[in-house]
Image (spheres, grey):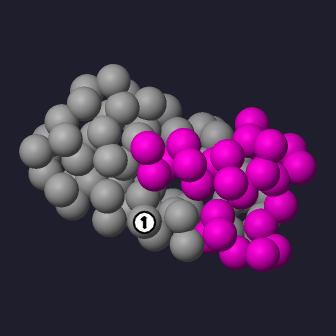
Amino acid sequence: MNGRITEPIAEALRYLTRPDCDFLWSRWQGAPQAIAELRELAASASLGDHAALSKLDLLFAPTGALQDLFNVNGWGDEFLRIADGFDSVRRNI
């Protein structure tokens, strides 16, 4: 399995851990819940768990939960860059 899948996830996590990240309109109750979910999916995906990869595909998809969260926080361009990195790694798995 390509361990590089964790790189774009780690980059997204850097934004989710910012103290100014607003989770009010997201699917997550707050940073701890979002961070735990992404870390768990990253760990499973790096071991080849296809269900975790499918869940990550949905999170990084256009209009997915991550893009919504990034947009609300004013980080839309940053999300697009990170999502492009995710897509690039994902194509090679």
In the displayed structure, does residue 20 sit left or right of residue 44?
right
Percent coordinates x, y for residue 20 in the rendering:
81, 74
Percent coordinates x, y for residue 2 in the rendering:
13, 51
Which residue is rendered at x = 32% and y = 65% of the image? Answer: 7
Secondary structure state at the residue bearing disc 1: helix
In the displayed structure, does residue 71 sit left or right of residue 49?
right
Percent coordinates x, y for residue 37 in the rendering:
54, 43
- Give yes or no for residue 38 being in the magenta stretch: yes
Residue 67 in sight here: no
Percent coordinates x, y for residue 5 in the rendering:
27, 54
Which residue is rendered at x = 64% and y = 40% of the image? Answer: 65
> Which residue is farthest top?
51
Q: Quadrant of residue 73?
A: bottom right
Asked if 81 appears above or below 46 in the picture, the reply is below
- The C terminus lies in quadrant: top left
The span shown in magenta is 15-40
Residue 54 in sight here: yes
Q: Nearer the viewer, residue 60 or 38?
A: 38
Q: Nearer the viewer, residue 28 or 81?
A: 28
Q: Which residue is mark 1?
A: 10
Pointer 1: residues within 10 angstroms few (<14), some, or many (20+)? Answer: some
In the displayed structure, does residue 14 sit left or right of residue 45?
right
